[in-house]
Every structure is written in structure tokens, then in C-alpha cells.
Amino acid sequence: MSRQQQESQGVVLTGYHSNAELLPKIGPRAPVSCPPAQVHEPAMPRTGHYTVQQNQITHPADGSGPSATEGGTKTSTTDPPNSQDSLDELEMDDYWKEVENITKGEQEEAWLTEAGLARLFDDSLAADQDQEEDSAVFLSTLTRSQAAAVERRVTTLQQTLLRRRNRQHVPDVRDIFRPPEKHEEPIELKGGSENGQKDITSAETETELNVEVAFSEQALTYRDNHQRAKVTASPNSPDDKLPNFKLLRDKTGQTRIGDLSPLDMKKVRRLVLVESTALFDTAGIDLKADKPVKVKTKESGLFGVPLATLLEQDHRRAPGTKVPLILQRLINQIEEEGLDTEGLLRIPGAATRVKLLCQEFETSFYDGTFPWQQLKQHDAASLLKLFIRELPLPLLTVEYLNAFFAVNKLPTKKQQLQALNLLILLLPEANRDTLKALVEFFHRVIDHQDKNKMTLNNVSVVMAPNIFMFKGFRSKVTEQQEFSMATSTAHIVRLLIRYQNLLWTIPKFIMTQVRQQNMESHRKQYKERAVRKLLKKMTTDKPSEKAVPEESSQGFIRVQAPQFNKVSMAVQLTGELQAADVLTRFLSQDSSVAVEQEELCLYEIGGNIKERCLDGETYMKDLFELNPAAEWVIRAVHR
């Protein structure tokens, strides 16, 4: 496919930036991400890296690479058509096109594999019936824009695979996304339209976040309505210029990260990967997730140790720890001294003293002999920032760091916020929990800005380089790049702090798709069991979906509490009954329960969900209508 054809189909090509000026004058060349071309009499080896571009081609800064006219055709105004130089340049152009095709194919293959859709390009996996059915169920729940994101990458990968030997056949994208047969019925959930969505054109103010409609679908509508309008974010705007976004209230309850079972969270992550890619696609941003890198790391200690290793150490001392103990202790130390100190987080501790303290922490933190009473507040803040910077892999991960950078390219603050919500859901649990602990602490610092003079802007500017510039990163960027990153990364940190209560939640449209997948899986299981029951003439098989209890049909639900003396109780469903009301009634009837209501959770279990801890403001009648086959269980929970 020619470059002109690719552009007409909306495929965004990556531009190439030369690093020739960064090469040493003498000695071996620095390692590069792709091999240099073999050219005749080169003036300088061509090296560099690809960057995200929006429908344009970036030329090498050193001018050594092939130029392109507006239409993408190679021209020469000084050399005869058959000169050796012209032939060499054409060979170079072909070479870099081939490198680009290969790289893009590998990236799409990795993306589809991460989304659990490897079967779409690997015929050898088709023999796995479970994998095939899982992919079919997953694809059946995708929205228009999500399906387009998958289809676009399957198409690109097919073009790459067809060039390879011994790969004569790959699945046809038209078969993967074929229209449903007439006898196939769409999956529906009570209380919503197809895919559980409402009309995108419904009234919505700029400060209301609609989480019932896929973000990428909303972005498509915005793009169609503002084709010629250029709306850009203003990272330098003051704190009060950030909109006061709020979620449209969902009567079936808000779902926070950590409220779902691991099985459902796995489904969430696959859907979020596709949805985030589709959202960036609407803005013409082609994201390239970097592959995980192997770095030499310490196997023990506190500073310069991977998060996973730290938490493994901490679990031996405090099971269930989600945030490294050293980080928790430093935050507590800063807060114990009071958050009114002027310049908190901004004024550094003495460098030599911080270095000595770091060494002392390594030897005495876990045995409890560190003299905390001698630790000054500014030194503790410097140690906290050092801990984040010294992580061998970035807190936002190598895979998604570029995606966080690219958030600023989205046209509106609402889309930027939606993208951050999705990216946080993609982070590994340890990274996500640690980031949340940090931004919550930053918010508490800002609450005292009248005394400490640390506003949202001030905290964001100070903390952005510590979060985004991980160990070894600065050696890979130029001074100009570092300067341009300052404003954009500070803006991302501002959004993380200001909207933390919205970002660590799972959008309802994702939850709707998870319920659809579970319903479809249950339907298949029920059919299989029915066939086995008929063949074996067994009458004792239990159906896969529990029948609605008679109590429920009469307006009551049975709430179980197996951990406590009062094993169960019947609760009448009314239009105003909320999950918090159920917990209050339970505590009033069982005086032996020695826990606070905040430590209890009413769970929705079974039906079209595996397990979900309910938000206290969940309206039980609305949720029951959405999932009538669920069981309702009260358990103690440690957040």
C-alpha cells in the first residue's frame, strides 16, 4: 500500500527524527532502536527514533534522509534521474519504508496479543475452542469505535503478514467483523440500549462526565461536530480554570478500582486497552507502546528497587500491603510535622544530609532503629522525591509512559480526563495504588496552601519531573525536549491531583460490556449443561443461573452475612433503598458486630457479574432489575 493510500484510510505514520548530532565523533556508535542503512559513501551514519505524528512526515534534522514532497513522492532537482546518488536515495527511501512496515506490524501484533485477540492473526490458536469463544464473546460487545480500532490494527497486520514467507493465509478482517446473522440476537441488558448506551446526542453540559457512553464514541461525535474547530488545552491556565467535572449519577452505583473480582478486572483491562486506543485514534494520535525493558535492579533494599520487589519484602512484615511501607512512612512523617510549612515539597533538604539519610534508611528502616525524631520535614520530602526518581522503571510504566505524554494532544480537557481514567486502569496494581497514595498526599498539601504557599500549580510543577523523569531518562532527551516536556507533564500531574476522585473509577459503559460478556458466557454454559443433562438423563443438575427467589418476586431480597451471627435477613425493595441503608439495618439488628459501617460492604455476587463491592449510594431496586439473579452478601472489607 502506498503512503498516499495509507493516509486516505486514516492510518497515521510515525515520523523519523535523526540523532546524528548526538553521536560521538570518534569511536563506536551509540546503540539505536533500528539498524542503520547500508549506503554508498555516507556522510554520517543514520540513526534516530520514531515519534508520534498526526498525519504528517517529519524529516531528519540532519537532512541526511530522503525528503518528501507534499504528496509523498521522492523528487530530485539537482541530479540526473539515473545518477548514482538518486538511486542511493531511492534505496534509502525503500529501506526506511520497509523498516517502518516491519516495526508497525510488530507493534500491532503485540497490541492484539495484549488485548487477548491473538487468534485474529494466528491460525494455530483457532484449535483452542475456549480461546475462540472468548474472542467471539469479547468482539460481540465492542462499540463501533472500539471495533474500528481493532479492525484497523488487524488490517495493518494482515498487510505485514502477507509479506512474510510461510504465511499464505491469515483470517480475513471482513470475517472477523461480519454483520450478525438474521437469527443472531443482540445481547441486551435491562435499563439500556444496545451496548448499554444512551443516545450520544442527549443533553450534557461541559462539566458533566457521561460514563454510560463509550468515551471514543463521544469523541467521534465531538470530532464530527467540530471538524474545522481547533480546541486546545491551556496547560498554563490557573487552578480555577480547570472545569469542575462531575460524574452523571448512576443509580446502579459507581464502581471504584478494587471493587471487582480479579476475573472481571481482567475483562475490564482488555476492554480498556481497546477503548483507550480507539479514543486516541479519533484524534489521529497513533500510540506506540514501548516494550518492557530488562534493567539490572537490586534484589533488596529501599531505593532503586522495583515496586514488585518492595511489596514482596513488605508483605513478609505486613500482609496485604498495597503501597511500599517506606513511602507510607515518609508521607506520615511529613504530615506529622504539619503541612503548613512554607515551600513544602519545593524547598529541598541539604544534599549531603539527604544522601547520608538514604544510606541510613537502607540499613535501619526494617529493623525499626531509624531515628525518625531527628528527620527534618524538608529532608523527608526530598527522600520521598528521591524514592520516586530512583525507581528502576517509571511509576507510569515504560509501556504507557508515551500514552501519558500524548494525553495533552487530545483536543479538550474532557477527553484528556477520559484518557487518563483509561490509562490508570491499564497500570499494574502496584503502580496504580502507589500513584493514588501520592496524589492523595499532594491534595492534602494543597489543602493548606494558605500557609504553605503550595498551590495546585506549584505542586504539579515540582512533582512532574520526579514522576516522569525516571532514572536514566534524562540521558535520552535533549535540553530542548526536556524544556518542552515541563509544561505538558505538569499539566498531566495537575489533572491527576485535581480529579483523583473521578480517575480511580471504572466507567459504567465498561461495566456494561463486562456484564454482557458474562451473560453471553453463562448462556453458552447453560446450553452445554442442558445438552449433557439430556444425554445423561440426569434430573439433579443445577442450572447455571439461579432462578429468582420467590421473595424477590414479591419485592424482597435475602441478604446473607455468613461472617456474622445474624446469618441472613430479608430486605424489602423500595425506590429509595440504598446499599448504605441495608448495612445500617444489618448493624441495628446484630449488636454483636464490632466493626464500623465504613468497614462493611454489601456485595453483588453472581448473575451477570462475578463479584462487586457496592457503592453506598447504590439504589438496590435499580440494581436488582439489572441483575435479578445475583446474591447479596455482607462482608468486612479492608480498603
Image: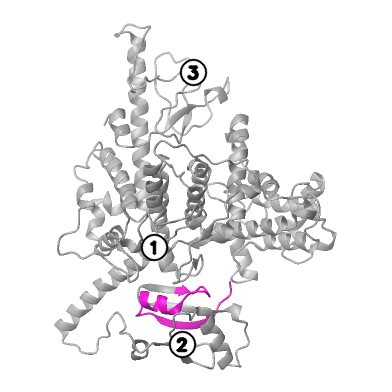
* Residue at point 49%, 87% (across, down): 561
Check residue 88 for magenta coloring.
no
What type is the residue that disc 1 sits on? Lys
In the rendered image, residue 321, in percent from the top left (x then y), is placed at: 61, 68
The residue that label 3 is drawn on is: 44
Contact (Cβ within 8 Å) of mark 1 with mark 2: no
Q: Which residue is mark 1?
A: 267
Secondary structure type for disc 3: loop
> Which residue is found at the position 82% from the left and 46% from the top?
350
Magenta span contains residue 636: yes
Q: Nearer the viewer, mark 1 or mark 3?
A: 1
Which residues are the magenta region? 612-639
Q: Quadrant of residue 96?
A: top left
**Amino acid of disc 3:** Met
Please state if 380 lies on the left or on the right of 473 as rendered.
right
Within 10 angstroms of label 3, few (less than 14), some, or many (20 or more) residues? few
- Whether 492 is drawn above or below 299: the answer is above
Q: Which mark is residue 210?
A: none
In terms of depth relative to the viewer, which is nearer, 204 or 195? 204
Q: Are marks 2 and 3 in contact (CB under 8 Å)?
A: no
The answer to which of marks 2 and 3 sits earlier in the sequence is: 3
Distance CA(mark 2)–CA(mark 3): 74 Å
Quadrant location of the C terminus in the rendered image: bottom right
Q: What is the three-letter code of the residue carrying label 2?
A: Gln
Mark 2: few/some/many CA within 10 Å (<14, 14-19, 20+):
some
Q: Position of residue 347 (x, y in %)?
A: 78, 46
Instruction: Tell me: residue 598, above or below residue 136.
Output: below
Check disc 2 and report the residue beneath it: 560
Find numbered disc 1 in the image and state the secondary structure of the residue it sits on: helix
